Each structure stands twice: as structure tokens, then as C-alpha cells.
Image (spheres, coloured by chain):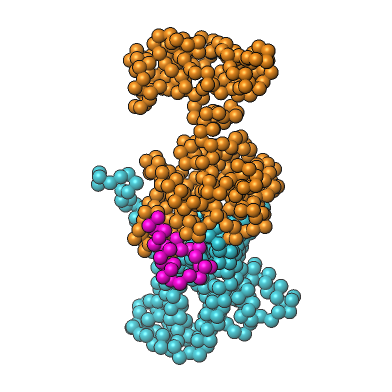
Amino acid sequence: MTHADAFILIDRVSKFFGAFQAVDEISIDIGKGEFFSLLGASGCGKTTLLRMLAGFESTTKGEIYIDGQPMSDVPPHRRPVNMVFQSYAIFPHLSVADNIAYGLRKKKLPRAKRREMVDEMLELIKLPGYGDRKATQLSGGQRQRIALARALILRPKVLLLDEPLGALDKQLREQMQLELRALQRQVGITFVFVTHDQEEALTLSDRIAVMAGGKVLQVDTPEGLYESPKTRAVASFIGNMNFFPATVRRNGAASAAIEAEGLGTFPMPIENITQPDGAPVQVALRPEKFSLTPEKPDTAHAVAGKVCEAAYLGERSHFHVAIEGKETPIAVSTPNQSRGGREAREQGIGAQVWLSWSPESIVILQGD
Amino acid sequence: MSDLSYIKRPNRPLQIYAILFLVVLYLPVLFIPLFSFNDSVYVKFPLTGLTTKWYVELWSREPVWNALWNSVKVGAAVAVISTILGVIAARAITRYRLPGKNVLVTFIMMPLVIPGIIFGVALLILMSRLGVPLSLFTVTLGHLIVCLPFAVATLLPRFEGFDKSMEEASADLGENGWWTFWRVTMPMVFPGIVASLLLSFTISFDEFIMAFFLTGTDPTLPMYIWGQLRFPQEFPSILALSALILFVSFFVVFVAQYFGRRGLESDQ
């Protein structure tokens, strides 16, 4: 993504509430038709950023451009964006059809055309024939769809979604995730989606901005964030991660090795190492990147350990494996169909096992 | 009785207390309609006979109609103005970050506990200092002070009760502040507005102390009653008039309560 073809350009935007800085010089480019998520724990500034896109909060510093137009002086009702609120904000005094048609007043459409557009929307959100119901008679999932339809009927350039699935129960949420993604492909509108649920962000998004303390830590595709996180904060926020304090060992210009606590010393491709000799780094390894075997495997990248916790999760099993030279046990996740996983589970807690990994799955992070 | 939960068990002493409470509160008041149908100029037992002649006589009295009309004019003006001011105040209190908000609310509610005689005297002095002649306008002004706390108290829960993202949603869907107010805010607080109008009207209609200090030559209905109390032979007619006012007040307050409650229920 280059600066020039950004559809939404958030340019060094800051937001202060009194002395409190909610958003700290954030710059993000979002492409046309992208499903973009702002992911972070509560209080990280993601909702404030979304509300600045909608125009409900002013920017203290910086500028937001949508389709090339600066937005600072544009009030919410003139912005080419629409929002789905966390509470849905369905108007309780109006019928479903009147809720959906709310934004059409200014378009001065003939009654029949309006009706047709509303029916089309009800079809799209899979609630045909619900037009005459009172908004107060709807379930949470239905309200959520009405809120979507009400925003999409105006064909906004950008749809903003503030944790729209947060209030739904797990099963309905997963179903709505799939529907939301399908809907976004169908209408081709740029979605900016705020969530604190990393799984949801990974499932839905083309790209994700991980936020913390008013800053953007990393902007990447779901795969990029998961496989090559840039910082320890991102690595631990997205999925589970094992961290090993380590030191860089450079052997001249040609080769390098990493000496990691508990894992021993192993060679690394020199192009993966940017730090000087002796620099402290963190070695990060996902639980599922480990293979668990009862016997010593035929590789240098292996270490012996003892199972101290085991949990059966149906499709997978999770283990905590204590190894020599490392205080906290290593989290390991294995598919239950694999031989090592099955055997370790059968032997139970206290079983002696070997952990092995491939050097490509290792992520080297800055700092100690 | 054992199948009822602890809190739902009928509580005999409490029921007796409730009945006693209502009797003590309303029995004296009930004598007014009772004697208004009594066929005697003197208010005393035993009753001498049933009649509606006091009501008929009332009907033909020109000054009563004038006073009624004055009270309706003042009441309507007070109801509309105090409700508009109440809407503005309630919106400001619930929607904007106001420094000293609690202090402000306390001051708005203060006239509820300050004796009317103090406000009445104060306004009378102010009016005479400013050289404003006493008239129905000065009565209206006095009644506004009395009614505004009731209007705000009725409207505030309505504004507090609804999600402010409703108004944001309207703005987001392309409506400016004016249209948002008419299409979202107004319909949602409407039951509160009706309740506030009815309540303010009733309070103004029945108010005496402010009117006592601030009335010019045109009396309101309570002022008229006060004036007639000097003439014993007029007393039964006054009882008839009081009975009517009593009935209308009860009715209006019940309607106001109904709207206030219905509004709160529909939010769920």
C-alpha cells in the first residue's frame, strides 16, 4: 500500500481529552474495498480513532483524509461514512423499515422506490418481511443486521463498525462473522472494524492495526501478524507465544547463531539477524510450532522436558512442558491425531518427552 | 401461603397502614364535594338534602368564567414555557460536559423547598422597583419559577434514560442537529414532554401564593375563591367550584403520571 492510493489516510492524528492522550500520532493508510480492523485492549484508543473517522470526536492534531478529502471541517452528517454502533442505536419509536430508510429523507425518493430499496436491504440481511415489525421486538442478532442495513442503504464510501458483535453469544457471533465477511465482499465497501477480540480480527480482516496505549504497534495482514510479529507486545497479543531470552552470536560476516535460554545454541541464517554480536534478543515460538515426541528426534533443534500440565481440547491438546534452564514451562499445542501428542496424553503428567522445532518457525524480537 | 416468596407475602399491618394513610390524607378533602351537594348555606352536619343548585348558580356567574379563563391562559403559557425551558435544561444537563453540573441541578430544584411567600415578596419588590404593573404576566412569571423544577424533574429521567448514540446515529445517517432533534430526540422524550405540560399546567392552575402577591386586577381562579370567602352566603358555590378544581387536578395528574410511566416502559 502506497501513500498515493490510500482511500482513507490517517495522517499523524493525535487526540487529547484534557491532559489524557487517547490517540498518539497515529498514521494509517487504508485501501479501497479493504476490510480493515483496529485491534486492541479496551482503552487503547481504537474506538476514539473510529469516532474521529465518523466525526464525533475532533482531531487535536493531524488530519484524516477520506477519498482525498480532508475531514477536519466536515461535520458527522456530511461525511461519506456510516457507522454501526456497539449498542446498535436502533430507533425504538420506528418500525424496522423506517429505521432502515431513516437516512433516505434527504434523497427525496418516491415512495415506491424507497420501499424497493428497503426490501432489497431486508433481503440482503436475510430478514425479508420484517419491515413492519417494531424495532423493540427484535433479538440482538436481528438488531445488529438492521443497524448494518440502515448504514449500507446509503452506500457509504466507508462503513465503520464499533465492536458490532460484542453483545452476541458465541455461536451467533461466529455465524455473524462469516455473514459480515460475505456481505463486505458482496457490497465492496471499505469496512473499518473495531474489536478487542483477536480471533475475530484474524477471521474477518484483510489487514489489522494492533493498537496499545494510543499507538499503532503494527499494521499487517492476519498471517503477517501471526507469523512475523515485530514486537513482543504484538506477539503476545495475537495468539499464544513462548518467549526465550537469548543472545546474538555473530561468527564474522558469514554466519550467526542464537543462544537461547533453555533451547541451547543453534545457527540462524545471517540475513535474519540485524543485531550486533552479544545483543540481547527474544526468541519467540508459537505453541503449535513444537513437535512432541517420546524419543529423541533426529534433529539438532530439540530439547528434553517433562509434561507438567495437560489439557484435552477435542481437536488439539495443550501441554505445559518444563525444560532445564528455563523457569516458566513451555506451552505446546499438538493435534490429537499426531503420534507424539497421543502418547504424551496417554502417559499423562510427568511423562518424559522431547520437543523439537524447525528453525524457520523461530521469530527473533528486539530487546530483552 | 408457603408457596409465596418471602418478599411477595401479603403484609397485613402494612396494608392497614396504607389504608389509614390514605384516609387521613384525603378524608378532609372529601368533605368539599360532599358539602357542595348539600342543600344549606351552612357547612355542618346533619346534611339537609341533596341539591345541584350551587353548581347551577356557579354556571351563571360571569366573574367565575373570567377567573377560569385567566387561570387557563396563565396555566397554558406557564406549561408551554416551562416545558420548553425544561427540555433545554435537561438536554444541556445530560448531553454536555458542564462544570458544576450538580450545583446547577440543585439550584434549579431549589424553588421546590423555598417557601413561595419568599419568592412572592421578592418578585413583588422587584416588579415595583422596575415599575412593572401587576398583571397576568407577572403571575405567569411567578408561576414559571414554581413550575420549572417540576418540568426539569419530569424531563430529566427521560433524557438520562436514552442512549446518546441514538442522536449520534441520526447525525451519522445524515441529519443535522435540528432534524435529529425532531426525528429522534423529540419522539423519544415525547411522553416526558406531555407529562411536563400537564403537570406544569395543573400546578399553575392551582397555585395561590405567587398569584396572591403578583395578581393585578384580573384574578386567577384560586384568587377568586379567596376573594369570595368573605361572603358566607357564597360559600356553597365556592365549595362546588373547589370540588370541580379538585376533580380536574386529580384527572390531569393521573394522565401525566400515565404518560410519564408509559414512556419509561417503552424504552426497554
**In the image, which residues are magenta?**
A99-124
- Left or right for A274, reference B151: right
Observer-nearest of A316 and B42: A316
Residue A100 covered by magenta stretch: yes
Q: Is residue B6 left or right of residue A366?
A: left
Could you tell me which residue is drawn at 66 percent across and 80 percent down? B134
**Residue in the image at 47% along x and 59% along y:** A153
Q: What is chain A's hue in the picture? A: orange
Q: Nearer the viewer, residue A358 or A161?
A: A358
- Residue A142, visible in the rendered structure: yes
Name the one closer to the observer, A317 or A3: A3
Q: Is residue A212 above or below residue A118?
A: above
In the rendered image, the quadrant that contains the C terminus of chain A is top right
Q: Residue at x 51, y 24 (%)?
A: A241
Residue A261 percent across, percent down from the top left: 57, 13
Q: Which lettered chain is shown in cyan?
A: B
Residue name at image x 33 percent, y 83 percent: B49
* x and y percentages locating residue A80 in the rendered image: 57, 57
| Residue A292 image point, x, y percent | 42, 16
